[in-house]
Amino acid sequence: MTELSRIRNFSIVAHIDHGKSTLADRLIQLTGTVAERDMKEQLLDAMDIERERGITIKANTVRIEYPAQDGHTYVLNLIDTPGHVDFAYEVSRSMQAVEGSLLVVDATQGVEAQTLANVYQAIDANHEIVPVLNKIDLPASEPERVKEQIEDVIGIEAHDAVEISAKTGLGIPDVLEAIVQRLPAPAAGDPDAPLKAMLVDSKYDQYLGVIVIVRIIDGTLKKGDRIRMIKTGGTYDVDDVGVYRPAMTSVPSLGPGEIGYLNASIKQVRDTRVGDTITLEKRQCETALPGFKPSVPVVFCGLFPVDTNDFDDMRDAIEKLALNDASFSYEMETSAALGFGFRCGFLGLLHLEVIRDRLEREYDIELITTAPSVIFHVYSRDGEMTELHNPADMPDPATIDHIEEPRIKATVLVPDEYLGDVLKLCQDRRGIQMDLTYAGTRAMVVYDLPLAEVVFDFYDRLKSVTKGYASFDYQMLGYREDNLVKMQVLVNDEPVDALSIMVHRDRAEGRGRAMCEKLKELIPRHMFKIPIQAAIGGRVIARETLSAMRKDVTAKCYGGDATRKKKLLEKQKAGKKKMRQFGKVEIPQEAFINALKMDG
Amino acid sequence: MAEIVEGGFGLYIHWPFCAAKCPYCDFNSHVTRTVDHGAWADAYVREIARLAAETGDQRLDSVYFGGGTPSLMEPATVQAILDAVRAGWSVANDWEVTLEANPTSVEAARFAGYREAGVNRVSVGVQALDDASLKALGRLHSKDEALAALEVARSTFDRVSFDLIYARQGQSLSDWRDELLRGLDLGTDHLSLYQLTIEPGTAFWDRKQAGGLKGLPDEDLGADLYEATAELCAEHGFEAYEVSNFARDGARSTHNLIYWNAGDWGGIGPGAHGRLTLGGERIATEQTLLPKDWLAGVPDGRHESRHLLSSLDRANEYLMMGLRLRDGISLTRLESMAGRPLDANRLTDLEGYGLVERSGSRLAVTEAGRMVLNRVVSELLLE
């Protein structure tokens, strides 16, 4: 156990690409925590997807021992938190587990929306915050302007910001000193009190089972203890406790203020809920830690195997993934167009993409993803509310009193010159402006937007209209009534359930027309003409006709060509099996998601 | 008494050399400075003897010299080959002996020698009727040279056909109509009219991949061009007896009909394919591609590989080749090859779309069906 006054627990808050991982690597390197030969980029991001996308999904922790200028050696515990809005709750728990934050801002770019959301989490957790300006070595860096911006936009002191270059190592010793001198030690805990520890995060290791990251508040955790999770009620025998340096290193015990891991032969990550309180089975603490929330999926979509024969494999894969991700939900779904699959719920779009990528990559299953949607609250005439996860399940409109949809507060930071485009995009998506302020040459736009309009391609559109210069973040605002209807798409006079969407009545014609036009491009010409229609109830609101294929014939085919041309035709025939047969129409898989993308 | 094979029996001779490679051509052709004509003649003769030993009981309906550029062969080589052929098989009274020729003055000068050797039909690679297009297609002849060569061909051979390539870069519907009308007036009895297709492994393909080769027609213009072709040919008494082949009465190509009617043919020369019925089985033969490997392989037979065609392969080939013909296929024959009929629902659908027609036991595509033949065939392919 370490004396409290020699412990500093902190996180790093930064926008993607502003240098969080590089700074963490440098801190680990400079303190000799990892031998030079074991260094690799982004030590803390473990999953391939994390490394590739430069994002953090799971919290990681590392213990650094630092001999400070005051002659004492300090234990610095860094928690690397997820940085994405999808994991806002997980971030908040990580923030609660530490006392301070380094706010890393790229001195060439300034504050971004994602930085804001996370720094507010740090402020909410009463953190002491040390601003760090990175990339100070680049000619384009403007430390003074960015300091002003931090003070204006975030409202924290920035004149004594530490100026560094994580890439070259410049200023890293100053960061270590600032951590020791400016961040507080953990609040006094009682090592002899009943164990009270926060479950910060957990992950599955194929050799060790579930590894839990914990922060000790009171009491002591050691090998052999029988622990109890207060919310889930599970009890486990602790096989090992330790810290990450960043390799797992056993320690005899963990005491108040310390952060480390425990391994207790827990089979499934699902049994460990982020934010839960861990105590001893025999000697329980009196109160659980505040702020626990079960995670609730907000974005839903259908996932179907491209090859219908893969369904059983897909079910196995989904069950395995779900064991290790409590925030991911699934139920079986049957679609006339796509066959058997699953309706899955996610914390957000990134979470959706991560799960889909893992299914495709780790389990080698090709998937069709249907358009993401949100949970609508459908109120019947007799006052009952049902959650609608899938437009295909929409009840008879005659029985509906009204429908409510989730709204979000979206914050966009954007350079002046793109402001008009951003405002137009937000208006087009049924947004209501809440705030518009300026910080230097950048505008901060706050909109109240329907989540349903955002889950699909809002972020792509935002990036495209601002050439990548805008940053975006959001918080949930709650549910509100609006004039929402279900729009169906009929291809060759048959409804295609996987293309049904919920849409605002006033926008239905426009969306319907856009979808029909898109489908006309996405569906290849057939040997007959195909009407493509959008309809509300029985009423057609938009219509396009895909004309019949006019010409597909091989010009030359003599004796020497027979073998090759026959193979080509057989291949063409096999290729068509990858499309979904709908009546007599074959629809390529990408149509199911691309038909909904809006160009404007 | 010689045996008559269903669909006919022919012999294909591949001459692999060209004076220059054309940018659209994906046939097995090679440009070389010198050719040992004697050695090549000997090799062909040897091959013919080998093939005749297996199939000599069949009556031969046709010989076809393709390439490459067979009009670069010395007449003596053609003579030696045809002498060997006549020694190996009994030939039909009306047998057809075609040679593909390029319309340059040098090549036209050999026409008389080919006739002497026994060639009775030439297929001339005219390709276009204006100099700019000929240049764009990488041809070595001019329009005037082509017309002169055609003149020589008509006075030398009973039967003359020529090729044109349309749907070229920047070619409009009216450009093509004008060009085709001039072509129809050139006094031949057979025409092969091909839409330009950009095949992998050609210079055009590379150019297109690199973003070049602009102005090729889209599907709709391609369809309009095809329709205009059929219409103009019909008006001038040329029947569209195959997707890209048009003939006046009785002037259909006997040899090519063997391919489309799934008859038997021997294939000799680098890269040549053949189909032989031996001991009740249908065999696909394929000879090695590179001229020097082929020449070296002939003495011990290393240059040829063979495999047995399954009953499905056989039926599918017949389906794919036979539906190219206006006369279509015999469903009875197809069924006896495959051991089962075509998918009745699909046939009914295709009839419903007006793409195929049944008449007795024959199945043929309609004019509309011919334009989407690849789709029709892949719909019907047996699995």
Image (spheres, coloured by chain):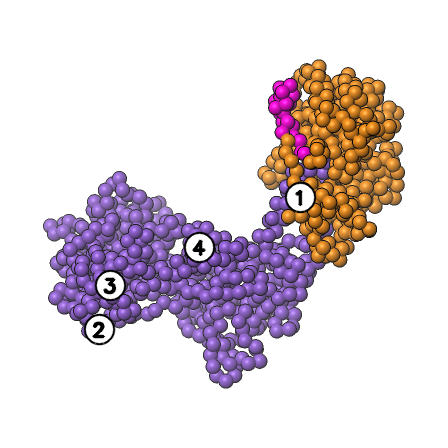
Chain colours: A purple, B orange
Amino acid beneath label 1: Leu
Q: Which numbered circle lies on residue A287?
A: 2
Q: Which numbered circle lies on residue A236?
A: 3
Q: CA distance from mark 2 to mark 4?
A: 39 Å
Q: Is residue B288 magenta?
A: yes
How far across and how far down the image is residue A3, in percent? 12, 58
Q: CA distance from mark 3 to mark 2?
A: 20 Å
Q: Nearer the viewer, residue A203 or B3?
A: B3
Q: Earlier in the sequence, mark 2 or mark 4?
A: 2
State whether discs 1 and 4 lie on one chain.
Answer: no
At a point 46% along the width and 50% down the height, the residue shown is A364
Helix, strand or loop at label 1? It is helix
Q: Residues within 10 Å of mark 1 (few under 14, many from 20)?
A: some
Q: CA distance from mark 1 to mark 3?
A: 64 Å
Residue position for label 1 = B312
Q: CA distance from mark 3 to mark 4?
A: 30 Å
Boundaries of the magenta span:
B282-305
Quadrant housing residue A406: bottom left
State whether discs 1 and 3 lie on one chain.
Answer: no
Helix, strand or loop at label 2? It is loop
Q: Left of A106 or right of it: where is A371? A: right
Label 2: chain?
A
Q: Residue furthest left?
A: A71
Amino acid beneath label 3: Tyr
At a point 84% along the width and 42% down the height, the residue shown is B239
Q: Earlier in the sequence, mark 3 or mark 4?
A: 3
How far across and how far down the image is residue A523, in percent? 62, 56
